[in-house]
Amino acid sequence: VRPAPPRLSVWLLRRVLPPGDAGAAVLGDLLEELDASGNTRAARRRFVRHACSVAVRYAVRRAPQPRPAETAHGESMAFDALRQDLRFAVRGIVKRPSFAAMVLATLALGIGASTAIFSITNAILLRPLPYVHADRLVYVSETNKGVRASFGYPNYVDYRDRAQSFDGLACHSGTSFTVLGESPQRVDGRLVCWNFFNILGVQPQLGRLFTSADDQPGAPAVALISERLWRQQFGGDPSIIGRTLRTNEQNLTIVGVLPGNFRFSRVEDVFAPLALTITPNSGWLDRGNHFGLYAIGRLKPGVTVQQAQAEADHVFADLKRAYPNTNSTNGGRVVLLRDRIVETIRDTLIALMAAVGFLLLLACVNVANLLVARGAARQHELAVRTALGGTRWRLVRQLLVESTCLSAAGAALGVLVAFWLLQLLIALAPPDVPRIHEVSLDRMSLAFAVAAAALCGLVFGSFPAFQASSGGRLHLLARASRTSSVTPHRTRRALMTVEVALALVLLAGCGLMARTIAGLHAVNPGFRSDHLLTARFSLGGPAWTTEKRLAFFDALLPKLNALPGVTRAALTYSLPIEGSQWGSIFTVSDKPVPPRDQLPAAAFCPIAANYFDTMGIRTLRGRTFDSRDLDASPKVILVNSTLARRIWPGEDAIGKRLKQGWPEGDGPWREVVGIVADVKLEGVDRDVPMQVFMPIAQETPRSVAIVARTSVEPMQVVRDIEAAVQSLNHDVPLTNVQPMTALMSDAIARQRLSLIVLAVFAVVAVLVAAVGLYGVVAHSVTERTREIGVRMALGAEGRQVLGLFVRQGLVTAAAGTVIGLGGAAAVTRVLEKLLFGVKPSDPATLGSVAALILVVAAIACYIPARRAARIDPLLALRAE
Amino acid sequence: MAVRAPLGELEHLVLLAILRLGSAAYGVSIARELEREAGRALSRGALYSTLDRLEIKGLLRWKSEPGGSERRGLPRRLYYVSARGLAAVRASQRILNRMWRGLEDVLKEPS
């Protein structure tokens, strides 16, 4: 069996060869030759080369050849000349395939990477939100001590009634629903003011939006659902309007279906009026309660965000005077909705955009470098053409057409690279990146790729073009080829310096991110994260009274603990790393009550008895909870060591008492019975807050997380856990099922993404710089062969020649390193917000990347220099 | 009939190669002949575009012949020099001969 001929070449030939016998005969000839020469590797290479040359000839010939008979003479001349330039350029490029390949690879990487990152940045940061007049949409919240906080409902109502800046203001609060059916599912949703969708300018694809009548206390419970839920739960039934959506909390009448592309900050399936939840006894009407309520507003035309902010400051100053008990530290904040939505990813994107800018610049410089080298090699050709009457403009144009051809091809390849890279980046992106579903290679991305290519082709192509075509020509013609002109060398070395500097900046960024990731991994979270499964469930709705919930928990825990593969299991309200579900101020019994704006706050967390054993959290003093701690028994709590240290410095916290809430509140006093070790609560990179744990029997939440320590891979026990939960109640679905390790890795996903991208960029940059340096030194060795011969004939040793060239390359690299260090110190500041445990100008990191660059540079110089040292002086002199 | 444009060097060589090969002139053999006798390693792109150009000028003709398994069943084009082609080769040769005249002393190979 004969091996198949190179497939790509055959495909190419079939595309360009004329149809019928004429083309078939050419292909036949090539195949016959391939087989006749034994299908060796050399033969296959020859086949590919011949195929390319045939393809180029036929592709150029088959292009229509316009004969502009009607156009003015001058125009047709110019057109002919341009076509000639083009043909000449293609021929010139094909003649030196390795040169073309190097240029194209550099351009494809530079343009591809920058186009991919630009596409992401454009879709997330630059493109307007997919709402009507998105530039007038704002996000309004309260602040507490300058930090964003949710509205107290009465504060919101007062603000809404007084604010004049808006055409409309609507509050909303993220929540979730258990949709009942054959297989109940927990879906995210949002409780909204009736005009929420009107403000966004969203129209339903079916039915109607909410009206103000829906949003009155006691109104029939209605809902809008997403297209996804409509298709999945109701099979896309067009007669859905008026049907009932059964949820754990309440039955809702469906009044409309939202369009498929609608999304507000996250994927949500059920929207219901806020009036459902704001009932007299719910706590919503208490001004001091902040239950996750935020607002969106549409600014009146002509009103700026600053004006709206000034108004909010004014209103909240009034509220502070009117309600000093609850509003002493509160203010209002108005920001553009777009800025709010992208704020989690903004710093990452800006950092990546900066990095990719450097990569593109490096690609340009490298291409310029290659073109200068090429120009130096072609000086003789250009000299001949000048002598034969070619004008300088004509020569420059020829070189420009060549570099434009190269960059056009580079752009085409770059778009391919961008396409792949974009898929990869979207797959790697942290799960909560806003607007990531809007990212695509669109017209703007293509325009960007073309612009980047034009920049490379024109700016950096013209530089070597003028350089190569300047100066007198005749002396070049006369000159023997044994010496070389100095100018291109100087230019190349200057360009190399810039390349090394750019590579160093990228490498420094990568180094800082690597230190950050290492730092984050080294953080001791305070618990054992391996072999730990987490899953949430929720017992919502009026049917789940406190007693029923507690009975459910009590029945569930023994079942979980008895499962094969599970060594221990417990329940908790908040999970470490994922963050607190309940932050509250508290009052201490044995200390003077501080002013209201200095009341301490802690993360409160009800847990089941063996939580600390399951998590592997150490008990420092006292006891943990046990079967004694029932609803009716004395109220007890555990505190973390941060709280004990901060509230009772130098004292024993055991036996002290505190109560959750305001000093005048009527909550029970709870006694500290133990102190536990600190655990990272809000992500890995934030300080541990003060934390209070209470027995689940004394404070029974509706939503809890299961934590299960397993002896097998955590995900293997999911089915059993789900079965255990649903054996008690079919309508309780599990959500957020994941190993603790996944939760922790999501928490540092932003930094990891930056590290991966920067690492790839840095490796490419260092490689490109190393190859460039190699090229410069190798070129200079070739040109100075005769000089080396003379030196060695006169007694220079190989070692000295080697040193000469390595030194020459290293001086270039060292200059680049120094400039790069300065640049890195200046620009790594864009990374500042992503860094953890390391400063942007960290000397250890900068020092080691500088050392790394110099080592790579030394190797890149050593290889060609060794060749110089091995030159036989006799051969070198005779070569002339 | 007078040939308007004189033959290019490569065209000249290709026509000569076809004449030398007789009835066995096709792409592969022409390329081999040129390489062996004229020392010219042609890119196939250059070879086929020369052949096409000569055909357009009416200097050569061809006929198709079914190919065997060595070319995977693809047809083979056998080239013949046309009468005009022969005239063109002769004309070029005449020009070269005229230009030689009187230079025998200068150009003769050292033996």
Image (spheres, rainbow, N blue to C red):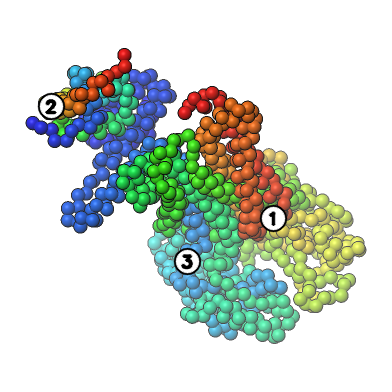
Q: Which residue is mark 1?
A: A841
Q: Position of residue A750 (x, y in %)?
A: 61, 54
- Distance between mark 3 and mark 1 Cα atoms: 35 Å
| Residue found farthest to the left | B1
Seen as rendered, the residue at the extreme top is B111
Residue lying at 66% horizontally and 77% vertically, measured from the top left = A331
Task: Determine whether, in the image, residue A369 is placed left or right of residue A592.
Answer: left
Host chain of mark 2 = B
Q: CA distance from mark 3 to mark 2?
A: 74 Å
Crowding at dot 2, Cα within 10 Å, few <14 / some 14-19 / many 20+, comes out as: some
Label 1 amino acid?
Ser
Q: Which residue is mark 2?
A: B87
Left or right side of A812 for A576: right
Give the structural element (helix, strand or loop) at label 2. Answer: helix
The answer to whether B59 appears left or right of B67 in the picture is: left
Badge 1 local density, few (<14 within 10 Å), some, or many (20+)? some
Residue A125 - label: none
Dot 3: what SS?
loop
- Which of the 4 image quadrants contains residue A803? top right
- Relative to A270, is A185 above or below? above
Q: Residue at x 40, y 39 (%)?
A: A478
The disc, 3 or 1, on the residue closer to the chain's N-terminal end is 3
Q: Amino acid at mark 2?
A: Ala
Residue at 49% across, 37% down: A483
Q: Nearer the viewer, residue A182 or A214?
A: A214
Q: Is residue A205 above or below residue A371?
A: below
Q: Between B89 and B71, which is closer to the camera in this rendering?
A: B89
Query: Marks 2/1: CA distance?
Result: 81 Å
- The reply to the same-chain question for discs 3 and 1 is yes
Q: Quadrant of residue A283?
A: bottom right
**Residue bearing the label numbered 3:** A128
